[in-house]
Amino acid sequence: MLRRGHRVVVHARDKAKAAATSEALRDATAVLLGDLSSLEETKALAGEADGFGPFDAVVHNAGVGGSSHRRLTRDGLEEIFQVNALAPYVLTAMMKPPKRLVYLSSGLQASGTGELRDLQHERGRFDGMRAYSDSKLWDVVLAFAVSRHWPSVLSNAVDPGWVKTRMGGRGAPDSIESGAGTPVWLATSNEPAAMVSGRFFYGRRERRAHPAAYDESLQERFLEVCRSLSGVALGSSGP
């Protein structure tokens, strides 16, 4: 996006990652700090980011993968849910609505349960892949809910593929470039196929998401749970 002449504001988890990112992306407008496993830092990040907005597009790309043990954040929430699903909700709700929103989901959203009664994965033996799959389904639910509440914003979810990142591992079949292709296209393209909202994409093609993602009642209940956990409400009027 920088090579294409866009002004880009980047997010990093900590000072070391911010320094490395600043070195790699010297033309970036800013590199902002915020650990998304902290509600306090996520809210501060939203406020700082708003100083550079309103944005043409916001891509919610940060996330953590499945783990073998259930980990709690300093807020007492299950880490995968908080970073992957609650944090993008908080950022969306607290920032001025952009023209476009892109939420990074996963093909594993198809294995999500869509079950609100155990968002924190407290029942039974912890399954990190289930927690991850659930969080990626909630990203789609969030994208679709925002699309309904903010009809003037293009809000979509993307499966970037299994990408050779540090989290994806060397055995992943897809390159970083291919994984970034669809999010960048949705964030910047004026092609009719990209000027849509409330859709789920893979490889620049619309795909059917998990059936639960289309359940408007579930969308509303998810928004309410996020509001209750974060103390932040998603406005209904949008821009």
Image (cartoon, rainbow, N blue to C red):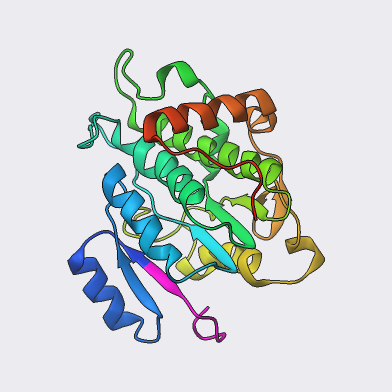
Q: Nearer the viewer, residue 4 or 32?
A: 32
* Left/right of residue 180 with respect to residue 212 in the rendered view: left
- The residue shown at (28%, 36%) is 67
- Above or below for 229 versus 182: above
- Above or below for 88 versus 225: below
Numbered range of the magenta stretch: 1-10
Q: Residue furthest top?
A: 124
Residue 4 magenta-highlighted = yes
Residue 66 visible (yes or no): no
Residue 177, horizontal then vertical, whole percent:
50, 70
Residue 149, horizontal then vertical, whole percent:
67, 42
Residue 14, horizontal then vertical, whole percent:
22, 61
Helix, strand or loop: magenta stretch: loop
Quarter of the picture containing the C terminus is bottom right
Q: Nearer the viewer, residue 171 or 70?
A: 70
Q: Nearer the viewer, residue 157 or 42?
A: 42
* Left/right of residue 134 with respect to residue 171 in the rendered view: right
- Above or below for 16 versus 224: below
* Left/right of residue 211 with respect to residue 31 in the rendered view: right
Residue 203 visible (yes or no): yes
Query: Exactly how many numbered labels are in the figure?
Result: 0
Snapshot quadrant of residue 9 = bottom left
Residue 144 magenta-highlighted = no
Residue 229, horizontal then vertical, whole percent:
38, 30
- The residue shown at (59%, 61%) is 98
